[in-house]
Image: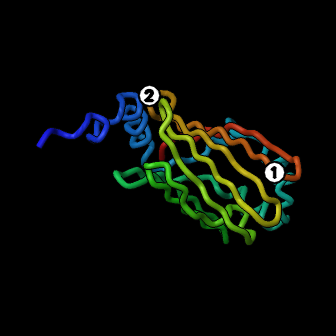
Amino acid sequence: SPPPPAAAIDAPAPATAVDAWAASAKMAGRWRKEGSRCPDEIPLFDAMEMSWMFRQAATLLNELTISSGADGWSVASSASFISLKETYPRDGRAASQMRRDLRSGTCEGSLEAVEGGVHLVLSWRGELAGSQDEVFTLEASGETLKRVVTLTLENGNSWRGTYHYVRT
């Protein structure tokens, strides 16, 4: 029988996609927030209408643990009563997540490789519905993780900040 048409054959991913996933794998490990190179989070806490107790706990979220494998990419952080671990498939499918503000309501996110890192998009329903766009990239020969966060709420509030982390 004749060979299948070229479009039906699984071809390797374009070099740029392979390079982007390679960059995401280099992010694996533990990262500590560089306080002097991070944004003021009070406007973020105000936009999210966070309680005093949640604000105090959130300020302790100073470390990220990133894992990257063939099946997915994950990011985790914990402090006090806040413990978050999110895992995303590498194929771009949406994955259910717990809301980061710990409110009830559905939340899902998806991940895609971008040049030099990953692009994560979260969206949630319920109280203070909205979305969060994050881009993780490496700087300084892989010793600094840069995380650009854009929050957009359906009530019109928004916030943008850039975080920097160093390997621990």
Q: Which image quarter holds the N terminus? A: top left
Q: Which residue matches tag 2?
A: 141
Q: Quadrant of residue 50?
A: bottom right
Q: Residue furthest left?
A: 1
| Closer mark to the observer between disc 2 and disc 1 | 1
Q: CA distance from mark 2 to mark 1?
A: 35 Å
Q: Where residue 54 sits in the image (x, y, percent)?
A: 77, 65
Is 86 drawn above or below residue 37 in the view shown?
below
Q: Which mark is residue 53?
A: none
| Amino acid type, label 2 | Ser
Q: Residue furthest front?
A: 1
**Residue in the picture at 49% in, 27% down:** 140
Looking at the image, which is closer to me, 98 or 140?
A: 98
**Residue in the picture at 29% in, 41% down:** 8
Q: Where residue 103 sits in the image (x, y, percent)?
A: 75, 69
Q: In the drawing, does residue 109 fall left or right of residue 59? A: left
Q: Which residue matches tag 1?
A: 153
Q: In the drawing, does residue 90 fall left or right of residue 84? A: left
**Residue in the picture at 47% in, 35% down:** 143
Visual colour scheme? rainbow
Disc 1 crowd, CA 10 A, few/some/many (<14, 14-19, 20+): some
Q: Where residue 44 sits in the image (x, y, percent)?
A: 80, 49
Q: Where residue 133 sits in the image (x, y, percent)?
A: 66, 44
Looking at the image, which is closer to me, 18 or 53?
A: 18
Q: How many marks?
A: 2
